[in-house]
């Protein structure tokens, strides 16, 4: 097996694909994952301001899942779950700091990448698939806590991130250390630090990643491949070429719907660490600037997706390649006055998920699905056996019959708290025993916590029982 790590520097340019042919017996996989991307920021998921033309086109060619949920709303654990096919309790990764422990916890059980290698595939990682510290591992151009055995080859992208030339502004109140000779502990990993970059987009990590993905598609077009492309935007710092900001004048950005006293019925354990008050984002003008920068970063990321999809089409590979687009978790953009992730509320736990596969008609699917369902799904689409350790459910039946369901509930873990999302309810249970309950049919924005209302006591008991039954099944037998 050849495994090497390469750091990229830059290049540039290309719009989408045709997914109409029958499934090939050696189906390729192009897996694309964005970082800190909320589904609600995408036009194909209903956003009326953010422009995502390439993902919109992919959605028109594939199955767009409207109720997909991550296993943990932070980078390291969510990515470990996706790639291992196991819940965080079973794979041993429940924090970013624990991301490097996956190989030891898995033992002989193969990751998604390993499974494809064992079945004769070339597998490559471009940029962030497992956890990488952004921006530190990007400015350093290093692997982060990668899982080496998952890849035939792996490639890192070294980009300037917060040091990018251009107009910059710190919108939140973190204490930042601007030391170009250091990569970690500088404060940029959670800060809404905005850079309107100079026109040279090619130096950005996501442009480099698209360049490398295009190069690999050309080089490996004649052998079965599993190509995993990780894009780091819209993770902070919010860096995009200045031209991408022109569509998003800050004064025109629409703030998230709000309600007076919204946090009053949310238990203390459920209040995000990243509230407007705590992060210095109380001024509506500042919030609009965050939205402008976030949307610019999303559209820049979307452009890189489009370049890769164009190349897939130009090479004639779309007819026998499964394309998956997703994110590691969702992201708050001011809902409940929350920002960023680490929340069990809908905007943080729900993820975008689009699967375009040969022979599959475009559709929308409302089935509850989970991030770990991707492992068995991709194995089946490639004609491979599903390893017995996988805890997810294959979604292949939904690709042909999108009106069906594979789950009656989706589950998310976050810092010892649990979300059980059913067809009707969002039930959140915290380590101190506090509970949130939302009627997702009558109250999809989760403004009214019903947990303490007597008429819903029976629902609380039933969902609590279902959660305990779910937790009892999370640890695998081996």
Image (spheres, grey):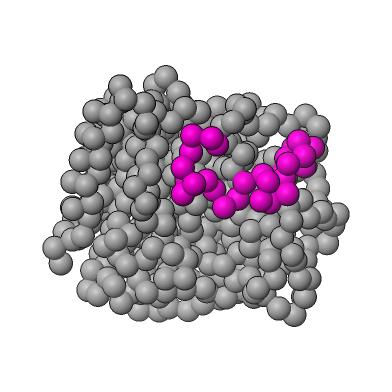
Predominant secondary structure, magenta span: helix
Say above or below: 37 vs 219: above
Which quarter of the figure is the N terminus placed in?
Answer: bottom left
Q: Residue at x 28, y 33 (%)?
A: 460
Say above or below: 475 vs 426: below
Q: Residue furthest left?
A: 477
* Residue 272 lies in the magenta stretch: yes
Provide residue 300's location: percent of width, then percent of height: 67, 47
In the visual, does 1 lie left or right of 170? left
- What is the tally of numbered marks visible in this picture? 0
Q: Residue at x 62, y 46 (%)?
A: 275
Residue range in magenta is 263-290
- Residue 251 found in image quarter: top right
Residue 193 visible from this viewpoint: no
Q: Residue furthest top?
A: 442
Provide residue 91's location: percent of width, then percent of height: 30, 65
Provide residue 14's location: percent of width, then percent of height: 64, 47
* Residue situated in front as seen by the camera: 128 or 400: 128
Provide residue 132's location: percent of width, then percent of height: 53, 67
Residue 105 visible from this viewpoint: yes
Say above or below: 382 vs 287: below
* Residue situated in front as seen by the camera: 451 or 39: 451
In the visual, does 164 lie left or right of 238? right
């Amino acid at each position: 097996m050849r495994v090497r790590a390469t750091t990229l520097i830059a290049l540039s340019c290309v719009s989408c694909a045709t997914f109409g042919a029958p499934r090939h017996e050696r189906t390729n996989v192009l897996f694309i994952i964005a970082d800190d991307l909320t589904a609600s920021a995408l036009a194909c998921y209903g956003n009326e301001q953010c422009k995502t033309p390439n993902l919109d086109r992919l959605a028109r060619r594939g199955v767009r899942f409207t109720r997909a949920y991550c296993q943990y709303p932070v980078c390291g654990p969510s990515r470990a779950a996706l790639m291992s096919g196991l819940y965080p309790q079973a794979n041993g990764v429940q924090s970013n700091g624990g991301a490097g422990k996956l190989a030891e916890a898995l033992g002989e059980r193969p990751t998604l990448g390993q499974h494809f290698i064992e079945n004769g595939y070339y597998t490559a990682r471009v940029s962030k698939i497992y956890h990488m510290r952004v921006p530190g591992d990007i400015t350093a151009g290093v692997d982060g806590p990668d899982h080496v055995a998952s890849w035939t080859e792996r490639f890192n992208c070294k980009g300037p991130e917060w040091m990018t030339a251009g107009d910059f502004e710190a919108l939140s109140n973190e204490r930042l250390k601007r030391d170009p000779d250091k990569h970690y502990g500088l404060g940029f990993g959670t800060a809404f630090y905005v850079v309107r970059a100079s026109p040279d987009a090619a130096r950005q990590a996501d442009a480099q990643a698209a360049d490398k993905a295009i190069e690999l598609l050309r080089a490996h077009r004649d052998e079965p491949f599993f190509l995993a492309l990780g894009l780091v935007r819209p993770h902070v710092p919010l860096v995009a070429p200045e031209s991408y900001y022109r569509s998003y004048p800050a004064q025109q950005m629409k703030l998230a719907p709000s309600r007076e006293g919204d946090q009053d019925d949310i238990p203390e354990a459920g209040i995000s660490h990243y509230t407007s008050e705590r992060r210095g984002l109380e001024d509506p003008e500042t919030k609009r600037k965050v939205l402008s920068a976030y949307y610019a970063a999303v559209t820049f990321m979307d452009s890189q997706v489009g370049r890769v999809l164009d190349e897939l089409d130009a090479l004639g590979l779309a007819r026998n390649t499964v394309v998956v687009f997703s994110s590691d978790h969702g992201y708050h953009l001011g809902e409940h006055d929350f920002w960023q992730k680490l929340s069990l509320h809908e905007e943080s736990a729900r993820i975008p998920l689009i699967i375009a596969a040969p022979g599959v008609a475009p559709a929308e699917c409302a089935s509850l699905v989970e991030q770990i369902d991707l492992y068995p799904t991709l194995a089946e689409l490639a004609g491979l056996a599903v390893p017995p350790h996988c805890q997810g459910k294959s979604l292949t039946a939904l690709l042909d019959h999108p009106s069906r369901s594979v789950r009656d509930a989706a589950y998310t873990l976050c810092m010892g708290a649990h979300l059980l999302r059913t067809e009707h309810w969002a039930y959140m249970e915290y380590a101190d025993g506090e509970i949130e309950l939302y009627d997702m049919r009558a109250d999809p924005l989760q403004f009214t916590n019903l947990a303490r209302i007597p008429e819903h006591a029976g629902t609380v008991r039933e969902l609590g029982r279902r959660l305990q039954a779910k937790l009892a099944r999370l640890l695998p037998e081996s």
